[in-house]
Amino acid sequence: MNKVIILDFGSQYTQLIARKIRELGVYSEIWPFNLTPERIKTLNPQAIILSGGPGSVYERNAPLLGRSIFKLGIPILGICYGLQIMAHLLGGKVTPSAKREYGFARLKPLWKEGLLQGIKAGGEVWMSHGDKVVEPPPGFIISGETENSELAVIESRERKLFGVQFHPEVIHTREGKKVLSNFLFTLAGLKPEWNMESFVERKVEEIRERVRGKRIFCGLSGGVDSLVASLIVKKAVGDNLSCIFVDNGLLRKGQFEELMKKFKKKLSLKVIGVDASQLFLRRLKGIVSPERKRKLIGELFIRIFEKEAEKIGNVEFLVQGTIYPDVIESISVKGPSARIKSHHNVGGLPRKHKFKIIEPLRELFKDEVRQIAAELGVDKEFIAQHPFPGPGLAVRILGEVTPKRVELLREADDILLQEIKRAGLYPSLWQAFPVLLPVKSVGVMGDRRTYESVVVVRLVRSVDGMTADWYPASARLLRRISSRIVNEIKGVNRVVYDITTKPPATIEWE
């Protein structure tokens, strides 16, 4: 199977590059910018993409490559900062722009036999840079320009090296997908072999080969990721799979009972239900750090899994629904990008446990997981459900998690979802949830002064959770949500609305 590796220099768009490449039918992975040529050879990519980034090639400690990468004979596409690195290292000249170029520009193709084959003149492209290439490296031709970037596209077909100053991966670049397609198929000679059907077949064979008749446990969270992971493993090992669904006391209202019925009746999974709500809430007492919450919850899940596995006997493997965005945010596989947070099933797991971990979906984005769910016959309603964090309501309660605060937020969550569904918005949103703040505010109810909690309402739209926009909800909807929460939930006297995008914020507050 063809593979493209993306060397990340800290661009906010790196994940979009990976997704666009996959949409074109080629498997892609994100790796740090400083991979050695030897490591790159072991990964055996058929093409390499150098991402954009916020740096300048002339800055002290700027992320740079060794020149030897350009001698591997592997087709390379540099995007924005990636183009500038290529030009800088190969003898071209990069200088600060007279003015920073951010936003739309019009592309003028000068040569249409390479990257710009089939690209219309005057099409909009998205720029985001402070430096620009003013002299190409020896042997490169200039095949495209914009008003402010005379070297917007450069190419050396003989050396299989190509670069663009704009971002073809973002939706704002009208024919960006065509540019990427030209690189992958016309110039690099790859084939579109990546699809969800072939992925499932490959994973089933890999799991079957690895497990070899041993028993497997799968931790279900109630979300589509862990469910799809369990269904793939079931195809591989059949009755050797047992699933466990733990009520950690941090689930939505009625979620545990409802999902236990679905798992057993509709999906024919062998599921063990464990009520550990008191244990989790007792252990979370006094803890306010988001990282400590996640790590504690991750450890408690593992210990419960170990205890239940002993009852079955001979359980060597644990299946988790880890997906690619979890990995990116938890472990910082990206070059100069920082770790955002530890997901309870990635960076939050204890180092020592009794299981060998199987993560069938570790390479996939959320929309790819949903495609597989549809192919496996999962109900549309389940597939379309909003992501729910593994640590549950704990990371939507800022500050200490107590039974009283959990119950307060659970009721607010139930009201919010009722109103979102009543307004017909649920399918068009990525997530809709309330957050309980660790502050109180003065209010007045029934002519009396109150001093009670504040709830934040968060509604966002997204494609894969890596970036997100806040939803411009109508005043009528927000008024109804606010009115119901403060009137029906004792202990809340103020509701506010979060209008922050991701980035700079994350979707969840913790």
Image: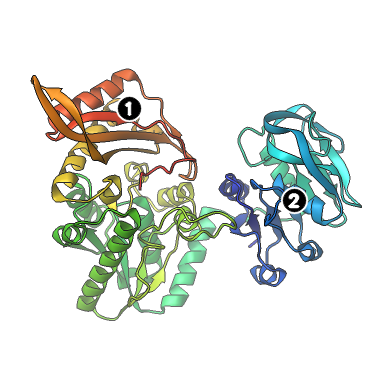
In this picture, is 267 found above or below 487?
below
Sequence-wise, the earlier of marks 1 and 2 is 2
**Given the image, on which type of amino acid does mark 2 rest?**
Tyr
Task: Please tell me which residue is depicted at 37% across the width and 41% down the height of the picture.
Answer: 384
Q: Secondary structure at mark 1?
A: loop
Residue that label 1 marks = 424
**Given the image, on which type of amino acid does mark 1 rest?**
Gly
- 199 or 328: nearer the eye? 328
Q: Where does the image place residue 153, in percent across and percent down from the top left?
A: 80, 41
Task: Please tell me which residue is depicted at 38% across the width and 73% down the height of the picture.
Answer: 351
Q: Can see residue 113? A: no
Number of marks in the rendered image: 2
Q: Where does the image place residue 315, in percent across and percent down from the top left?
A: 30, 77
User: Distance of mark 1 from mark 2, alpha carbons?
Assistant: 52 Å
Q: Is 493 placed left or right of 59 in the picture?
A: left
Within 10 Å of disc 1 (Cα), the crowding (few <14, some 14-19, many 20+) is few
Question: For residue 487, what is the image quadrant?
Answer: top left
- 88 or 300: nearer the eye? 88
Question: For residue 361, what is the image quadrant?
Answer: bottom left
Q: Can see residue 212? A: yes
Task: Please tell me which residue is depicted at 88% across the width and 55% down the height of the picture.
Answer: 158
Task: Please tell me which residue is depicted at 29% across the width and 22% down the height of the picture.
Answer: 477
Q: Quadrant of the image for the N terminus?
A: bottom right
Question: For residue 54, what is the image quadrant?
Answer: top right
In this picture, is 65 found above or below 416?
below
Q: Where does the image place residue 166, in percent across and percent down from the top left?
A: 71, 39
The residue lying furthest to the front in this view is 60
Find residue 381 and name its label.
none
Find residue 58 and name its label.
2
Q: Where does the image place residue 446, in percent across and percent down from the top left?
A: 8, 21
Within 10 Å of disc 2 (Cα), the crowding (few <14, some 14-19, many 20+) is some
